[in-house]
Image (tube, coloured by chain):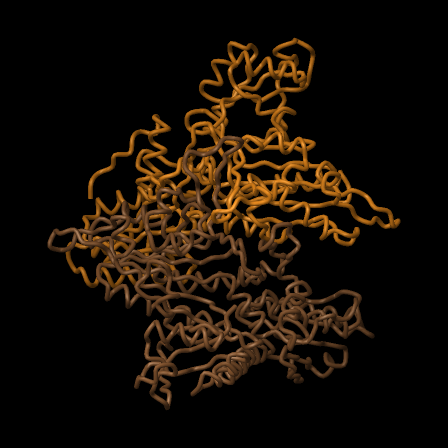
Chain colours: A orange, B brown
Amino acid sequence: MTESKIPSKENFSEWYHELLKAGEIIDVRYPVKGMCVWYPSGFALRRNVYDLIRELLDPDHQETQFPLLIPETEFMKEAEHIKGFEDEVYWVTHGGTSPLDIKLALRPTSETAIYPMFKLWVRSHADLPLKIYQIVNTFRYETKHTRPLIRLREITSFKEAHTVHATWEEAAEQVEAALSIYAEFYRRLAIPFLFAKRPSWDKFPGSDYSIALDTVMPDGRTLQIGTAHLLGTNFATTYGITYENTEGEQEFVNQTCYGVSERCIAALISVHGDDKGLVLPWSVAPVQVVIVPILFKEKEMTLEVCRALKERLAAAGMRVVIDESDERPGSKFYKWELKGVPIRIEIGPRDIKNGVAVLARRDGKKLTVPLDDLEKTIQAEADDLQEAMLAKAQAFLDSKVKDCETIEEAKEQTLAGVARVGWCGSEVCGHAIEDEVGAAVLGEPWRSEEKRLTRHCIVCGANTEGCALLARQY
Amino acid sequence: MTESKIPSKENFSEWYHELLKAGEIIDVRYPVKGMCVWYPSGFALRRNVYDLIRELLDPDHQETQFPLLIPETEFMKEAEHIKGFEDEVYWVTHGGTSPLDIKLALRPTSETAIYPMFKLWVRSHADLPLKIYQIVNTFRYETKHTRPLIRLREITSFKEAHTVHATWEEAAEQVEAALSIYAEFYRRLAIPFLFAKRPSWDKFPGSDYSIALDTVMPDGRTLQIGTAHLLGTNFATTYGITYENTEGEQEFVNQTCYGVSERCIAALISVHGDDKGLVLPWSVAPVQVVIVPILFKEKEMTLEVCRALKERLAAAGMRVVIDESDERPGSKFYKWELKGVPIRIEIGPRDIKNGVAVLARRDGKKLTVPLDDLEKTIQAEADDLQEAMLAKAQAFLDSKVKDCETIEEAKEQTLAGVARVGWCGSEVCGHAIEDEVGAAVLGEPWRSEEKRLTRHCIVCGANTEGCALLARQY
């Protein structure tokens, strides 16, 4: 086993790429730019993360699947939407050697595939609300620099939900419900984030407004890891989606959509990982516990005890493996740390005699624990570890957000994190902020209790309660 | 509730289309031919069926995901493979408004996407065997008549496995292992089938040989519901996939691939369904038990008992719902029969007084059972029902396969099912059989103990142990 070549996390970009490779998450060597292969162990992580999404959505949504290919005629119906996507759509123009009558777009997102069907599915108020989701691959012809799991030409794991409601207010409530689901999702991944209402010039094309979740990456740039959009009647008007209300009249429906992509896994890796490798939350780690037998004498007896323990832990519902390979314990520790396994159990003959084991947490904490009731001990340590991960990540994020009073300060702050500045809310001042600071307006904080002290726009000086979050974005 | 408009199953094609619609499996109204939408309840069935595939594959395979788009340069490397697919490949030629430098194929199957990566993944004998699978959407520009779940332009649920081995023999053993997995899969779906070694002119392009699973549809035509291919070193040679053997020499690997698509769900629906609607096996039914309260008096008490029972059954791991709607019991029975729910429990006030319930199986069997131990009773009836479904389906399939001595007989037989005829195995006689009978040679029976009585080729008259299965195919 060769020793690690993972660069320090301080060189975030290098560290990230090397970790995807050494941690066997993603293979970037596929011969099309921006399209990657999930390694088996990466896919095992993805499965757990997306099972978690399903678990959170299933009580109030139904999973479906719509086609990938969208006829140009449908795709081109919603003017604002087209404008937002036309430069980055892949087009299928040929079947075999024959040109197609109507070009087919590879979905960049599925509004234009789904809503013509909603027109057929929704008849009356009794059909509402309708809440569906799908987990699919989507495509963007990115001309910017691509990055695995972050900026891709094939997004392999887009979870998009689409809901239909009678009124605008109900749709707006659904946006909040979606944000609560995402908040719970990220809480379980121990990933902190900021809610921001995107500025008008950065909302989803065809929406009334968009709320985003941004996390802060190790280098201080933000990563959008989820969005929820209030579509109102914009698409309903275009696609003719109406329902018969209780008075027997036809009305346009109100819609929302909200999505999460494999960026959630990019965040998972980036927020928690360290110089030793991946650090995976217990909730989704493909291997939660690794048992390392310390085999210098009484080898068979030690293995027996370890195997029996493995059965016990598996029976308690834990994802557990035992490393019986011939490597030295040190190499094994190194290997399983790299893979991000939350809990390691070391057991040697002397431990067995004493009825104990060594429990090592991925955050470095090590303790000797009794073999009796080990299930409970592990679960308690796992819960504590998960909380500690969230607390640490939250402290990091908090340290990266600062109020700034001047453009200069904001410029400085956005080199390392997120600046919060007074903003009157006007588009003119917003663009001026972006130009002068050299960072993006993430938008106004949403669902935030915090109030800024100063109350004037950083550009025009007008008195205002409003403020904007600024950052360099991935 | 309007009464059923499902045509008799004797009009198989009409019946099938109506059932997909009334059973809310697939919506065919998507505006691209051969591309369909999964209704939520269809997708719930799909999830259970594919969870079953995963359960069977996971012990010996790893799930992964490879990109959809394959550069023309990689796609065009394996000559025989291209020839097999070039007429039915969709091509992406544009990103935004710019033509792409290299055209991208939508995978019709993923050999040419995966094997360039296997070249990078496989180094030495220690890396073998390698066994991966993915569940993905694939595309075929079908010029023939398309049919939902059967002949599609977007196959939404292609499970393809790809394995790499040191020797041809090990690869051949893996083909058998794959067939055993598929046999178990279809046993759990209560779907009988025939194994056939496809004739040389119908094997997978680029393989040494192909074994297929064919089931017999209600109209006597066969449906291919799974295939396993021995690729030998054909792709390894093209893509340069080698490993270092124990002597330190580079050798080409031997490969297999095997796949199942949503045709498994087409088979599920077609084999088991009846004039009342879907008939779903207990193993994968999204709703396994429906409780119908008989509400004419003591309504609240009856509902209480039904709700408590629902909790009990759910706690026993059953997928159970209770129908509390205002419809009459008859309408409810009709509705849940249409959906194919295996077991219905009816409970009224008198039943409660007597400590019993009525258990109605989807196959029409009805019995009064004690409420005590109802979990066990239901499970026993469910097991019996599942066995009865397989036995019935097997008897139907057996009735549809007949030995034929003459071309005339075979012609007659293939109008209604599968003919088994003597065949010397030559391509010339094989093509002659197809031409004269007007049906396809499915191939030689594989893993079949049965021997035919006559031992001469139906065309050339040569003495032979060999025989061929003939059928009209979907």
Q: Nearer the viewer, residue B393 or A256?
A: B393
Residue ranking furthest to the right: A247
Residue B410: x %, y % from top left: 47, 82
Taking B218 as reference, is B332 left or right? right
Residue at 47%, 53% (x, y): give it. Answer: B88
**How many marks on residues?**
0
Residue A316 figure quarter: bottom left
Residue at 46%, 27% (x, y): give it. Answer: A144
Residue ranking furthest to the bottom: B453
Q: Nearer the viewer, residue A158 or A116?
A: A116
**Residue A202 seen:** yes
Residue B229: x %, y % from top left: 35, 63
Taking B228 as reference, is B217 left or right? right
Residue B371: x %, y % from top left: 65, 79
Task: Give the vertical position of B379 relative to A331 (above or below).
Answer: below
Residue at 48%, 31% (x, y): give it. Answer: A142
**Residue B390 seen:** no
Residue B372: x %, y % from top left: 62, 79
Task: Give the vertical position of A355 relative to A267 (above or below).
Answer: below
Quarter of the image for the N terminus of chain A: give it. Answer: top left
Task: Give the vertical position of A206 relative to A461 (above or below).
Answer: below
Residue at 38%, 52% (x, y): give it. Answer: B82
